[in-house]
């Protein structure tokens, strides 16, 4: 090797150690970055032109390797939209409507316009449920969109059912057939009355009057009318009528008695009132349970994301409406992904194409709420590597100095 070869080799050595220190600096500076994957520096020998009679010096080249498949520790937080992945998958995110990229940085926060955005400005993507609950496949990549919710929205729920548990007096007087509520005559008579409130599809109140009328031994008529202030006669007949029978030995409904009262709510859904808990005992009329489902419009409260990735809008009365399925993305070779700004990754030929799977299914892992993935940087190891790189750089500089000194000696020789 010539003296000039010594200079070139030592310069390459210093450049390689400088690159190593640079990657170490990046790792240390990102030791607190959520979901950061540390970068290691590997060296490759570069040989010069060799000859049979003399040694030809070479140099060294630097290669960077990101340990993308390495998982960091999971830390619990108090924010429900902080998300971590226990597994090999990634969140699908987008920025400014650009093509989807992958990230493990799940520090998502709601923006003023209703998106879930992490600290790098990437928005979480999901698959709109649209009332469907099928499996998540890679074909859903085209349907994925930035998750958005309306924090000022209202939601109503139509009633579909209710329940009444009551006792009707066993010693009541029977009402003549011509005066039963179902006849809807002005002189109609009844034994007991209860009112319920149901809701249509738009959340409008739909009140109903429920009449219990004894028709004979252990036999009762149950009738439902659209509530009106005047009472009998109503402007229309009953919306539903049933005749129930009680077991005289127990006071409970007999085995062959109807146990529900069904009717349709205008502008709403079919409704069924559960009568199975009615009793006929020697006591006054009393109601122990009376409820219906559905509700008037209520305001949005918050969102929840389950381990299966189902994102639901939660309203102030506890109503849950599924809005998105948050998928997990993955590739065949995670370490072949290309890093981009914002602690995100894009697919490459080495990584393979992006695949999607439902959280908790397949090999991509599951979503952990109120948690974040820590950086994979080990500060103690990085400081050790930095000392080694610094010393190697110093030694290479001494080799360069030695070669320079020898060249100076040669240049000062007198012939």
Image: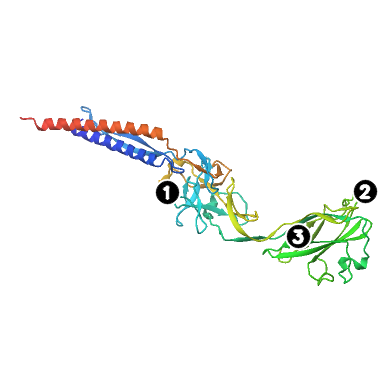
Image location of residue 331, percent across then percent down: 49, 44
Whichever of labels 3 and 1 marks the residue nearer the N terminus, that label is 3
Q: Circle 3 is placed at which residue position?
A: 271
Q: Decide which of 283, 164 is in the foreground and name it.
A: 283
**Number of dots carrying numbers:** 3
- What mark, if any, has residue 249 been given in the picture? 2
Q: How is the image coloured?
A: rainbow
Sort mark 2 into few (<14), some (14-19) or many (20+) by Cα contacts within 10 Å. few
Residue at the limit of the structure toward the front, as seen here:
284
Residue at (26, 32) in percent of width and height: 394
Q: Decide which of 242, 80 is in the foreground and name it.
A: 80
Label 1 and label 2: CA atoms lie apart by 75 Å
Q: Circle 1 is placed at which residue position?
A: 342
User: Is residue 23 depicted above or below 181 in this figure?
Assistant: above
Residue 216 visible in image:
yes
Quadrant holding the N terminus: top left
130 horizontally vs 342: left or right: right
Q: Are marks 1 and 2 in contact (CB under 8 Å)?
A: no
- What mark, if any, has residue 137 been given in the picture? none
Element under disc 1? loop
Whichever of labels 3 and 2 marks the residue nearer the N terminus, that label is 2
Quadrant holding the C terminus: top left
Label 3 and label 2: CA atoms lie apart by 31 Å
């Amino acid at each position: 090797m010539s003296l000039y070869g010594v200079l070139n080799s030592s310069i390459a050595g210093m450049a390689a150690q400088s690159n190593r220190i640079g990657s170490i600096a990046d790792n240390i500076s990102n030791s607190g970055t959520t979901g950061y994957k540390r970068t290691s520096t590997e060296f490759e020998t570069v040989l010069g032109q060799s000859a049979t009679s003399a040694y030809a010096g070479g140099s060294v080249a630097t290669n960077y390797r990101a340990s993308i498949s390495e998982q960091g520790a999971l830390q619990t937080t108090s924010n429900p939209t902080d998300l971590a992945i226990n597994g090999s998958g990634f969140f699908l995110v987008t920025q400014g409507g650009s093509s989807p990229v992958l990230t493990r940085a799940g520090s998502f926060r709601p923006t003023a316009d209703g998106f879930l955005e992490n600290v790098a400005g990437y928005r979480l993507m999901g698959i709109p449920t649209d009332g469907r609950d099928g499996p998540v496949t890679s074909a859903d990549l085209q349907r994925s969109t930035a998750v958005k919710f309306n924090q000022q929205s209202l939601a109503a729920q139509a009633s579909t059912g209710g329940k009444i548990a009551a006792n009707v007096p066993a010693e009541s007087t029977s009402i003549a057939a011509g005066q039963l509520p179902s006849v809807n005559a002005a002189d109609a008579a009844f034994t007991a009355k209860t009112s319920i409130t149901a809701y249509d599809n738009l959340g409008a109140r739909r009140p109903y009057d429920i009449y219990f009328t004894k028709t004979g031994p252990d036999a009762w008529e149950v009738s439902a009318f659209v509530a009106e202030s005047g009472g009998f006669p109503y402007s229309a007949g009953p919306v539903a009528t049933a005749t129930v029978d009680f077991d005289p030995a127990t006071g409970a409904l007999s085995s062959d008695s109807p146990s529900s009262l069904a009717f349709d709510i205008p502008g709403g859904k079919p409704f069924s009132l559960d009568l199975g808990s009615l009793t006929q005992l020697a006591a006054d009329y009393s109601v122990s349970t009376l409820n219906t489902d559905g509700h008037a419009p209520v305001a949005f409260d918050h969102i929840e994301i389950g381990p299966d990735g189902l994102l639901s809008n939660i309203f102030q009365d506890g109503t849950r409406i599924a809005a998105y399925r948050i998928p997990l993305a993955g590739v065949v070779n995670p370490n072949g992904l290309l890093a981009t700004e914002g602690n995100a990754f894009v697919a490459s030929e080495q990584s393979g194409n992006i695949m999607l799977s439902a959280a908790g299914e397949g090999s991509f892992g599951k979503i952990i709420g109120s948690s974040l993935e820590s950086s994979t940087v080990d500060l103690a190891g990085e400081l050790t590597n930095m000392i080694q790189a610094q010393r190697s750089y110093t030694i290479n500089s001494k080799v360069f100095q030695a070669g320079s000194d020898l060249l100076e000696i040669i240049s000062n020789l007198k012939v």
